[in-house]
Image (spheres, helix red, strand yellow):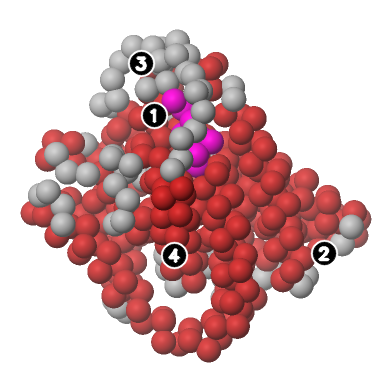
Amino acid sequence: MIGFLAGIAAGVLLGTISGLLPGVHVNTMAGGLLAFQIVLIPVFGPEMLAVAMVAALITHTFLDIIPSTFLGIPDADTALSVIPAHAMCLEGRGEEAVRIAALGSVAGLLAAIPVVLVLLILAPLIQGYLDWAVAIILTSVAGYLILFSESPLHGGIVFLVSGILGLFTFHFAFLGIGPFGFSGLLMPLLSGLFGISLLLVSGKGPVPQQHFDGISLPSRTVVKGTISGTIAGIVVGWLPGLSNATANSVVASVTDYNSDRHGYLFATNAANTVNAVTGLAVFYAIARARNGVMVALSALEPPPFVVLLSAASCAAVCAYLLTVLLASTAWRFSGINRNGLTVGVIVFITMLSFLFCGVFGLFILLLATLLGLVPRLLNVPQVFCMGAVTLPVIIFSLGFSGF
C-alpha cells in the first residue's frame, strides 16, 4: 500500500508538471522514472513505478488544458481544443472552459472503465481485422469534414498542404535533434499551426476580467460529448499510429468547436482520458504499446491490470481537484497586457523548439505558423490543419513507409 500511495503522489506531481509546462510531455516523465528505478525499486518496489507512470499519464490529460486556455499554447493532446478554450479566456470565461474540460475528463474515465474491461476480452480476438482499417477510418473522417464544409475546395487544399508539411516533418525527423539531444517535432509543428498562428491574430490590449458564473451543460451535451469522446478515445487508443490530435479531428466531425464550444471541450477532453485508459488496456490485452508511457511500462514487470486501473481512478480524483483549484485562480490573468503575453509565449515556444529540435525545429515552427494563418485568410475552419498529422498516419497505415 505504501508503494501504491507513493506512486500516486509521484505520478500526480509529474503529470501536473508535464501538463502545465508546454513542450514537456508525460512520456518524458515516464522515462525519467525509469532512470531512477535503481533507487526507487529497493525502497518502494516495482509496483510504485508502474503506478506512478499511469497516474502521471491520467493527470496530464486533466492539466494540459490550462496552458491551452490561458496562454494559447497547444500540445499534441490539445491541438484543436486551444481554439475554443483560449477564445473563452479572451471573453473572460477561462475558468469555465477549464472546468468543462475537467468534467469531460471525468466523464471519459467513468465511461472508459466498463469499456476497457470488455476490450480486454475482445482485443485479442479481433485485432488482426482492425490493423488494416486505420487508413479507411481516418480517410472517412477527413473526407466527411472536407466535403460537408462550407468551402470543400479550400478546406481540401489546407488539409493537403498541411499533410505535405507533416510528411516533410516526419520524414526528416532525424534533423530535429536539439542541444538537449531530444527530438519532438510534433511540438513545433502543432504549436505553429494552432498556437502562434492564432496568437498573432487574437487581438491586442489587456486580458479581459476573468469571471466565473457557473457552468450550464445541458444533459444532451453531456451525453453526446461522452459518447463521441469515448468512441474517439477508443479508436485512437486502440488502433496503431494515432494520437490525441487525431481524436480531436474525429470529435470535430460531429461537434463544431465554433458553434458548440462547451460540447467540443467536453468531448475532446473525454477522448484524451479515454485514450489513456484504452492504451493501458491494449497493453495488457495484446502486449502493444500505444504511447511512450506504455513503452516505459514494458521495461518493468507491471502489476495486475486492476491495480493500475485503480491507480488511474485515484489519480483522476486528485487531478480533477487540482484542475479546479488552479482554474479558480484565473482572475490573476485579468488585466495582463496581451501584447507582452503574446510575445512572451512566442519567445518561450521558439526557445523550446530550438532546445528540443534544433534549427530544424525552428524551420518547422516557421512553416507551420505561416500555414496556420491560411485558414483565416480563406475563411475555413482551423481543423483542416490537422492534415499535418492525419495524412501521414493514413499514408503510413497503407504501408508507404518511404515517405
**Which of the two labelled residues, at mark 1 and mark 2, occupies the earlier sequence position?**
2
The answer to whether the residue labelled 1 contacts the one labelled 2, judged by CB atoms less than 8 Å apart, is no
Whole-Å distance between the Cαs marked 1 and 3? 18 Å
**Which of the two labelled residues, at mark 4 and mark 2, occupies the earlier sequence position?**
2
- The label shown at residue 46 is 2
Whole-Å distance between the Cαs marked 1 and 2? 43 Å
Whole-Å distance between the Cαs marked 4 and 1? 26 Å
Please report the residue visible at 67 percent of the width from the left and 38 percent of the height from the top: 321
Residue 290 appearing in the image: yes
The label nearer to you, 3 versus 4, is: 4
Q: Magenta segment, which residues?
A: 93-101
User: Which type of secondary structure does the marked residue at label 3 adopt?
Assistant: helix
| Mark 2 crowdedness (10 Å alpha carbons): few <14, some 14-19, many ≥20 | many
Q: The residue under label 3 is which amino acid type?
A: Asn
- Quadrant of image for the C terminus: bottom left
The residue that mark 4 highlights is 231
- Report the predominant secondary structure element of the magenta stretch: helix
The residue that mark 1 highlights is 88
- Image location (x, y in percent) of residue 352: 47, 37
The residue that mark 3 highlights is 339
The label nearer to you, 1 versus 2, is: 1
User: Which type of secondary structure does the marked residue at label 4 adopt?
Assistant: helix
Residue 193 versus residue 306: which sits nearer the camera?
Answer: 306
The label nearer to you, 4 versus 2, is: 4
